[in-house]
Structure formats: structure tokens, C-alpha cells
Image (cartoon, rainbow, N blue to C red):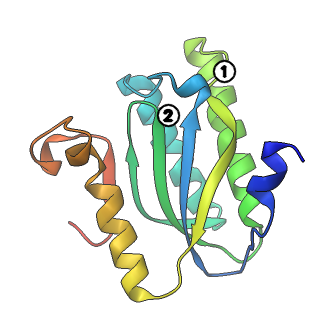
Amino acid sequence: MHRSDLLRKGRVSLINRFYSITLVAHKREDKFISIDINRLIIKEMKNIEDQKAAKTIAFVIMPNHVHWLIQLGNEKSLSDVIKSFKGRCSKTIRDRLGVQKLWQRNYYDHMIRNEDDLLNNARYIIANPLRAKIVDKVALYPYWDCIYIK
């Protein structure tokens, strides 16, 4: 069985459920260190939300991966949302900035089980730059957001 088949095995897509998603840069390269690339990624997250395909709860864009906590909308499956997001990011960034390969082929997901799991995942996502020792305070890292922190 191919590795990508193992990632999809058991994946469930349920309307209005929360999912923690990890998307990794092609070859784990530090592709997400440019303000131009990161702004375009955030814009595509907002486009997904505007289309009501998913609501962003929290995200952080790390140098070589993205953590994205979403609530799935009521019209598209999780895989359709991720495919659309990755495809539009790739096309826009390729057309505007010349980056040829942006993402690894697959993604990792975790369906949130309860409110504690939701809050723990949001905290984990936001604290990622601290654990990576990129910054000493989350407020100093520019590429994150969380609806619980304003």
C-alpha cells in the first residue's frame, strides 16, 4: 500500500466538526519565511471562510509547515477544502512569486473530539513558534491568529 493511502485510511469528514490540519512544505523546505507568501496563504484561508467551506479557529504559519484549526462548513468535504486551499495557494504563489512546488502531496488531520480537545489544539498551534524557539513571546511572531485571542 502506498504511504498516501495510509494517510487517507480512516479519515472522516463531518459537517460542522472541528479539525486540526497540518500542511507541510515541499521537501520540508523553509518556503514560508516570506511575508509575500504568508500573506497569500492567509488570504486563501480567508477565501475559504468567505465561501463558507470552513471557518478558521486558529492557524500558525511556520517556516516549513502550517497548522490550521478549522470548523468544516456544510457543503464540502475536508479533502475538498484542503485540495482547494492548497491548489489555489500553489497557483497564486507560482503565478505571482515563481515558487514552483509549494506543498507536500498529503496532509495530516485530527478530528477534534470535544471542547477541551479544541482548546488544547488551539493552544498547541499558537505556541508552535515558542516551542521551535523562533520567538520568546507569541505576540512577536507575525504569522498566526486565533479567534480566542484578541
Up the image or down, 138 lies above or below 37; here it is: below
Q: Mark 2, residues whose alpha carbon is within 10 Å: few (<14), some, or many (≥20)?
A: some
Q: Earlier in the sequence, mark 1 or mark 2?
A: 2
Q: Is residue 89 above or below residue 150?
A: above
With 131 as the anchor, is 12 left or right in this view?
A: right
**Residue 22 screen position, x and y as percent:** 54, 51
Which residue corresponds to the image point at 50% horizontal and 22% vertical from the top-left? 29
Q: Residue furthest left?
A: 136
Q: Which of the labelled discs sits on residue 101, or is there none?
A: 1
Name the one closer to the observer, 23 or 8.
8
Q: Is residue 56 above or below residue 14?
A: above
User: Does the image show residue 80?
Assistant: no
Can you give x and y, in whole percent of width and height, for residue 36 in the image? 42, 24
Indicate left or right for 131 with 99 as reference: left
Spatial CA span between label 1 and label 2: 15 Å
Q: Quadrant of residue 103?
A: top right
Dot 1 alpha-carbon crowd within 10 angstroms: few under 14, some 14 to 19, many 20 or more? some
Task: Please identify the residue farthest to the top as the structure is shown.
Answer: 98
Q: Is residue 122 left or right of residue 110?
A: left
Question: Which is more toward the observer, 76 or 14?
Answer: 14
Name the residue that disc number 2 marks.
Answer: 40
Residue type, label 2? Leu
Q: Secondary structure at mark 1?
A: loop
At a point 34% along the width and 73% down the height, the residue shown is 120
The amino acid on which the numbered mark 1 sits, given as a three-letter code, is Lys
- Residue 78's spot in the image, x, y percent? 71, 64
